[in-house]
Amino acid sequence: MTTEHNEPRSDTVRQANPFRRRVQNAVAAWIEGEWGRKEAMLAEAKRHGWTEARSTAFANITLTPELLAASLDNVSLSKLRRELHKIGAPSPGQLIREARLAYAKHLLVETRLMIREVRERAGYDNDKHFKDTFVREVGMTPTEYRRDSIKEGTEPT
């Protein structure tokens, strides 16, 4: 779609930006693997005990803007913010929040996991925070979202 001056719409340009896609893919991949890495680390700690190194490694499993920047060719957080701002993309924190919510929506529709399990796997530590965030961003509770998705023919597996 173009504007009056036959220029591409800024939304299209922003979505097509390779850097933005790379960041979004990195965020999505990290979040999808986060829960499994946490479970593996907890099992290891249960077998061998908690050490300072394990505690540090466990803390670094949860994606933060700082860890995202470091994972992208070890750029600084301020440089990542500047580069995202240049292309009109959301902040690193906002990209992470959007990806967590997208993953939760995926799990709600594609699985039969309990809402609590969806919340945990999507990286939310608190039931109320998850529900409030979901309602604010999606306009309905996670349960309503799942129910509406099933009504539309997308049966969870």
Image (spheres, rainbow, N blue to C red):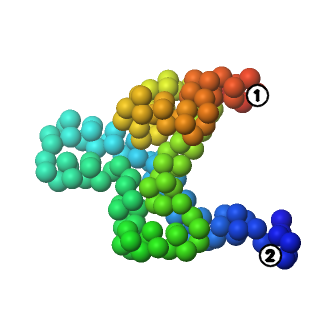
Asked if 117 appears above or below 56 in the picture, the reply is above
> In the image, what residue occupies the spot 33% across and 50% down?
61
Residue 109 percent coordinates (x, y): 63, 32
Between discs 1 and 2, the one toward the N terminus:
2
Camera-nearest residue between 129 and 150: 129
Q: What is the quadrant of the N terminus in the image?
A: bottom right
Label 2 neighbour load within 10 Å: few <14, some 14-19, many 20+: few
Camera-nearest residue between 132 and 110: 132
Looking at the rendered structure, the secondary structure element under dot 2 is loop
> In the image, what residue occupies the spot 35% across and 62% down?
66
Residue 79 percent coordinates (x, y): 42, 74
**Image quadrant in which you'd find residue 47:** top left
Asked if 89 appears above or below 157 in the picture, the reply is below
Camera-nearest residue between 36 and 79: 79
Labels 1 & 2 near each other (Cβ < 8 A): no
> In the image, what residue occupies the spot 53% across and 49% down?
99
Looking at the rendered structure, the secondary structure element under dot 1 is loop
Q: Which mark lies nearer to you, 1 or 2?
A: 2
Q: Which residue is mark 1?
A: 152
> In the image, what residue occupies the spot 56% across and 27% down?
141
**Image quadrant in which you'd find residue 144:** top right
Position of 60 with respect to 12 (left or right) is left
Residue 55 percent coordinates (x, y): 19, 48
Q: Which residue is mark 2?
A: 7
Q: CA distance from mark 1 to mark 2?
A: 37 Å
The image's mark for residue 31 is: none
